[in-house]
Image (cartoon, rainbow, N blue to C red):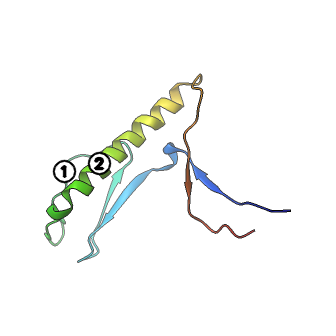
């Protein structure tokens, strides 16, 4: 017999995304579904993050879309599918 342990989350389980400056370790938390304004530098130490502007833009899209998907799933009881994400965890039985 094989036992499989998986951990899956719904889009609504993602409450926020945390960004941490690798220089000063300052953290910014953005709630899922919201992205108030573009982030181009650490608000604490001022180090520029403009080199990673493409990644931050993609992250913004992911956060906003998670909010949209979460809202859609919670209001559409007739949807033919449910979206979940499998996450890494302790998969030992």
Q: Secondary structure at mark 1?
A: loop
Picture residue at 49% right of the left edge, 44% below the top:
11
Residue 40 or residue 28, whichever sits in front? 40
Quadrant of res 77:
top right
**Sequence-earlier tag: 1 or 2:** 1
Q: Secondary structure at mark 2?
A: helix
Residue 12 horizontal side relative to residue 51, left or right: right
In the picture, the disc for residue 17 is none
Examine the rendered structure and indicate whether residue 54 appears above or below residue 11.
below
Image location of residue 92, percent across then percent down: 71, 70
Residue 43 or residue 19, whichever sits in front? 19
Quadrant of res 5:
bottom right
Asked if the residue under mark 2 is in contact with the one under mark 1, i.e. CB atoms within 8 Å, the reply is yes
Residue 78 or residue 42, whichever sits in front? 78
Picture residue at 31% right of the left edge, 52% below the top:
59
Image location of residue 46, percent across then percent down: 13, 69
The number of callouts visible is 2
Image location of residue 63, percent across then percent down: 36, 46
Examine the rendered structure and indicate whether residue 25 appears above or below residue 30.
below
The single residue placed furthest to the top in the displayed view is 78
Residue 44 horizontal side relative to residue 59, left or right: left
The single residue placed furthest to the front in the displayed view is 1
Q: Which residue lies under the disc numbered 2?
A: 60
Examine the rendered structure and indicate whether residue 82 appears above or below residue 75.
below
Picture residue at 36% right of the left edge, 42% below the top:
33
Residue 68 or residue 15, whichever sits in front? 68
Q: Which residue lies under the disc numbered 1?
A: 38
Q: Quadrant of the C terminus?
A: bottom right
Examine the rendered structure and indicate whether residue 71 appears above or below residue 57.
above
């Amino acid at each position: 017999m094989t036992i499989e342990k998986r951990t899956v989350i719904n889009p609504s389980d993602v409450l926020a995304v945390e960004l941490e400056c690798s220089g000063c370790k300052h953290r910014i938390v953005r709630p899922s579904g919201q992205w108030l304004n573009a982030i181009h530098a650490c608000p604490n130490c001022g180090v520029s993050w403009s080199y990673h502007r493409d990644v931050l833009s993609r992250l913004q899209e992911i956060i906003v879309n998670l909010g949209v998907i979460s809202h859609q799933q919670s209001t559409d009881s007739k949807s033919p599918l449910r979206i979940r994400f499998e996450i890494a965890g302790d998969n030992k039985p």
